[in-house]
Amino acid sequence: MLKSITSCSGSLAILRRSSIYKSGVRLASLHSSTPAIQREGLGDFALTDRVAIVTGGNRGLGLEAALALSTAGSRVVYCLDLPEKPGEDWNAARQSLAKLDGAGRLEYVTNDVRDQKKLLQTVEEIATKEGRMDICVAAAGIAGAARPCLEYTEEELEEVYAVNLKGVFFSAQAAARQMHRFQTPGSIILLGSIAGSIALKHTPVLPYNTSKAAVIQMARVMACELAPNNIRVNSLSPGYIETPMTTATISARPEYKAIWSEQSVMNRLGKPHELRGIITWLASDASSFCTGSNIVVDGGYTAW
């Protein structure tokens, strides 16, 4: 049994906004037929009054996504993850958001993305309570064991696929059903990886690679099916980010930090907070013509 299912994650980045603007008027967006009050300076990036779910939201990239959505004005972001209680990073994030004028609520819900029936019920209850569903970030994932492809067992494959493939689909499906139910334009962001497009040098993780390749294709297929419902679906493929997964690997194999960094044209690993901007863009009306795309944020790792 997995002890924790969370996003491939890193330490909580410090909130970079000391305040959030509350004034400014802009023309109506997809989410409103009348002029709306938006946060000054955010324009189409504002997520005013939107309701979001983030799976794997207890820490790391999932929590970074939740922070991005909250600081951009979401009414509430529900973080779904496996632990019964949220961790220190999540509690610290909630306390920090509480100090920001106008930031959205951060809520925690225990859930297992591998359980389709329970996940569908949980997301339906959230949408019913809030009266809408606007955004989904499917960030729950695991790396699995690293070993030569000739040695993987069926159980090891199933462990990764249950979370990274089935869990991502169940999350997107649950959110899309509620977006369709309430007839709200929606944005679904599936967390992929550059590992879904290339083989990772000196990193033998075939189940992880193939699961992330499936996520990228899943986003394309869902985007085509859901476009008539005004629901956009995209995948986000980060490169190597300083997360507990990479930190643990580097602790065991210090040479990996140099190997991974040197493959990037920027000669470093990414920071979790460096994905906040692209997540906000994908979730907002600023990306209203973007669907079925795989957005790569890898410091130039795949540019060679």
Image (cartoon, rainbow, N blue to C red):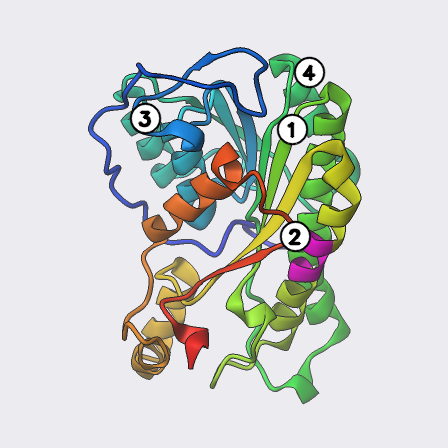
Is residue 267 or residue 31 the one in the foreground? 31
Residue 174 image position (x, y, % from top left)? 72, 35
Q: Which of marks 4 and 1 is nearer the N terminus?
A: 4
Instruction: Locate the C terminus and report the quarter of the image it occupies.
Output: bottom left
Is residue 282 or residue 240 the one in the foreground? 282
| Residue denoted by label 4 | 128
Q: Residue 292 carries which label?
A: 2
Is residue 83 or residue 177 the one in the foreground? 177
Question: What amino acid does circle 3 point to?
Answer: Leu
Principal secondary structure, stretch drawn in magenta:
helix
Q: Residue 246 carries which label?
A: none
Q: Is residue 121 visible?
A: no
Q: Which of marks 3 and 4 is nearer the N terminus?
A: 3
The label nearer to you, 2 versus 3, is 2
The label nearer to you, 3 versus 1, is 1
Which secondary structure, mark 2? loop
Compared to 25, does 68 lie above or below? below
Q: Dot 1 surroundings within 10 Å: few (below 14), some, or many (20 or more)?
A: many
Question: What amino acid does circle 2 point to?
Answer: Gly
Which secondary structure, mark 3? helix
